[in-house]
Structures are given as C-alpha cells and as structure tokens.
Amino acid sequence: MRLQSVADHQTAAEEAHPWADGLRAVGALIGPRFPRAEPRLRAAAYVQGLLSPLERKNGWPLAAQAGDEPPSGVQHLLGRAVGAVEVLMP
C-alpha cells in the first residue's frame, strides 16, 4: 500500500475546490425553490449524492450518503415536497 504524499493531498484538494464551489452554486440556484430549510438541505445533499461515486443511485444509497436513514426524507423530497417545479423543470 502506497502512502500519499503531501503533494498528492494538495492536488486532490485543489481539484475538489471547483467541485465544491459548483455544488454551492447549484444549492444557491435550487435552494430558493423550497420554502423550508429541511427540503432545501436535502435537495442539495441529493444532488451531491447523484454526483458521488455511488454504484447505485436510488433512494436508499442516496439517503445513506446524506446521512438520512431510513430514506423516507429523500422519498418525501422526490414525491411530495412542495417546491417551484415549474422553475426546476421548465
């Protein structure tokens, strides 16, 4: 097993910053579409899960990735949460 050098960690951090900035930008775009904080945070976590290296991207793994078990919160977000759908899906 090879130990990563400090330079490897710095390179990984430099590559991660644009992704983190992009996720924050997506969160800023979709956040105002949800009147409550909980669905807003859950939607941002859902997008992050979709972009993650998870093998299966359905309710259970995405909920677990977001620290939300059981997946009822994700299921509520996708099926019943109130949001400005016409803006999210023009």
Image (cartoon, rainbow, N blue to C red):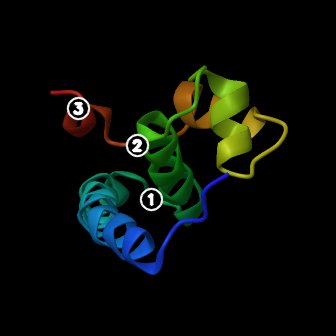
Residue located farthest toward the right when viewing the structure as drawn: 70
Tell me, for residue 86, which label it has, or none. 3
Tell me residue 68's x, y (percent).
75, 47
Return the residue nearer the eye: 7 or 90. 7
Q: What residue type is labelled 3?
A: Glu
Tell me, for residue 35, which label it has, or none. 1
Compared across the picture, whether 60 is left or right of 83 comes to right
- Where is 19 relative to 83, above or below? below
Mark 2 and 1 residues: CB-CB less than 8 Å, in contact?
A: yes
Tell me residue 63's x, y (percent).
69, 39
Tell me, for residue 15, which label it has, or none. none
First of labels 3, 1 by sequence position: 1
Return the residue nearer the eye: 70 or 76. 70
Helix, strand or loop at mark 2: loop
Residue 75 appears in which quarter of the rendering?
top right
Q: Which amino acid does label 2 sit on?
A: Gly
Could you classify mark 3 by the number of other residues whose Cα lies within 10 Å: few (under 14), some (14-19), or many (20 or more)?
few
**Residue at the image position 54 percent from the left and 29 percent from the top:** 78
Q: How far apart are marks 3 and 2 (CA)?
A: 9 Å
**Residue at the image position 45 percent from the left and 79 percent from the top:** 6
**Residue at the image position 44 percent from the left and 72 percent from the top:** 9
Q: Mark 2 points at which residue?
A: 83
Q: What residue type is labelled 1?
A: Pro
